[in-house]
Each structure stands twice: as C-alpha cells, then as structure tokens.
Image (tube, grey):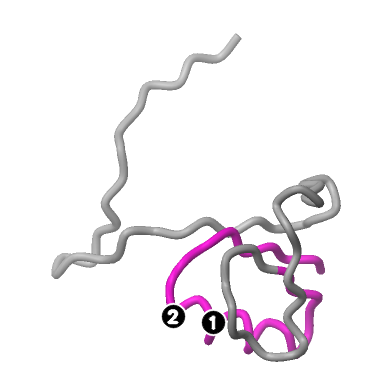
Amino acid sequence: MDILFLGGDKRYKFIMDDLSKNHSVYQIGFKDTCKEVHAINLEDLSLSKFDVVLLPISGINDNFEIKTEKRKFETF
C-alpha cells in the first residue's frame, strides 16, 4: 500500500516509521524521518499514486473528540 502524509506534527513521525515497516510511506513537510519514509516535493505530487492520504488533525480534546468544521455537503 502507498501512503502519503501531508504535513502534521511529531506524532505523525512515529506513525510513519511504524507503517513504513510494511508499506511504502511518503511525506511532504517533514525534515527528519526514518530512511524508509520517502520525502517528495509538492510539485511532484500525483494523488492518483496513493492508496491513502493522511492530513493533519488539530488534536483530541478531553472528551476524545476531534475538532472539525461542520459543513453541509450537497449531492448532485
């Protein structure tokens, strides 16, 4: 599986390192990751290559909730 991390914080480095043991892991926005994690440039990004794309989250509060912006999506 090809997994892309787009940004994040130090917590994501641990996840990337662990996932890279069994998957191809790529990242944008980190300077120091393990050698099995591949750094790519935003200019070279082709989302169709990846099975999973992970984006940063703001964190989890004391009620184990993730802060998100509520939106109404319309189907066409």
- Looking at the picture, tell me which residue is in the foreground, 24 or 34: 34
Q: Residue furthest top?
A: 76
- Where residue 62 sits, quadrant-wise, is bottom left
Query: Viewer-proximal residue, 56 or 60?
Result: 56
Q: Position of residue 75 (x, y in %)?
A: 55, 14
Q: Is residue 44 above or below residue 24?
A: above
Check disc 1 and report the residue beneath it: 13
Q: Give the image location of residue 55, x and y in percent.
A: 52, 56
What amino acid is found at the position of numbered circle 2 in the picture? Lys
Circle 2 residue: 10
Q: Amino acid at mark 1?
A: Lys
Give the Cα distance between marks 2 and 1: 5 Å
In-front residue for pair 47/60:
47
Q: Which residues are magenta?
A: 1-26
Q: Residues within 10 Å of mark 1 (few under 14, many from 20)?
A: some
Residues at badges 2 and 1 in contact (C-beta under 8 Å)? Answer: yes
64 vs 7, left or right, is left
